[in-house]
Amino acid sequence: MLPLIGATAWLFSALPVSALNVTQLEPQERDTLHAVVAALEPLMTAKKKDGTANLLTWQELYEPLTGSQRALLDEFRALRASTLGATSHYFGESTAGAEIIPVGPEQIVKDGTPAPLDPQYLPRPVLEAYRRMMEAMQANLGRQLLVESGYRSPAYQLYLFLFYLPKHGWSVTDTNRFVALPGHSEHGNPARQAIDFINEAGINGEDHPEEFEALPEYRWLQAHAGEFGFALSYPRDNAYHTSFEPWHWHYESK
């Protein structure tokens, strides 16, 4: 069992109003971002190896960085999705009082070869509801869904956003369609905790959503997930202007 997650703010002062070029980062901003990711690589390699990357704290994230690199992180933390043409909610960065529990170990069997999933965590009530739901799915279908991504701390969410920015042409606006900004992700909000599901054969739909949409497990979720407190977050043509994510469900406390 892990301790309760407390407030882990790491602020030098009030967060600044971001002056980032959100359409496409300027060359200097790109250079600083490259340096940030390089500086964080040893830390993230170690945390992925011991299975605690998802629990990254603000202090751990900021500590290896220089003043200018920390300032860049502050600018990203000051961004709000509403200024990027999206309508996703801002939940805030605090996860105070949430008891985060390991899910696994889990493994998929892809093309006949077993493969372990990265360690995942969920708030205790969500993990208990997920287990009840999977027991019911197993009884009905003879199969279950696994947790490919559960709780992600706001600090880890920011790291992921920075990591994937180059893959989306250095555009903050475009990246935000696929990776939420810190404080905006249901994965970092225990009161509305998200789970990204993957089936036992390794189908997660992230490259081809229609593959997950075609699964019997997905149709079962559509019919029964609400009985256990879960709801689909991003259906087709959703109000948040994000892509269709049939694998992404969140828990709504009853």
Image (cartoon, rainbow, N blue to C red):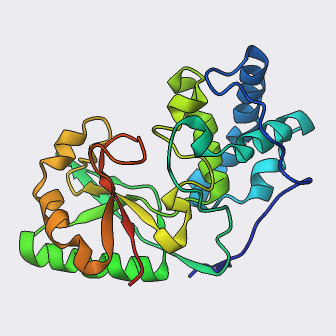
- Closest to the observer, 84 or 224: 84
Q: In the shown orientation, is residue 212 left or right of residue 254? A: left
Which residue is at a point 76% across and 66% down the rendered structure image?
8
Q: Residue furthest top?
A: 27
Residue 145 visible somewhere in the drawing: yes
Q: Quadrant of the C terminus?
A: bottom left
Q: In the shown orientation, is residue 218 left or right of residue 99? A: left
Q: Quadrant of the N terminus?
A: bottom right
Image location (x, y in percent) of residue 145: 25, 63
Residue 50 visible somewhere in the drawing: no
Q: In the shown orientation, is residue 190 left or right of residue 6? A: left
Which residue is at a point 14% across and 68% down the rendered structure image?
223
- Closest to the observer, 63 or 9: 9
Residue 127 picture quarter: bottom left
Q: In the shown orientation, is residue 34 left or right of residue 210? A: right
Image location (x, y in percent) of residue 161: 59, 40
Residue 20 picture quarter: top right
Look at the picture and state if 68 lies above or below 132.
Answer: above
Image location (x, y in percent) of residue 15: 83, 49
- Closest to the observer, 6 or 243: 243
- Closest to the observer, 24 or 167: 24
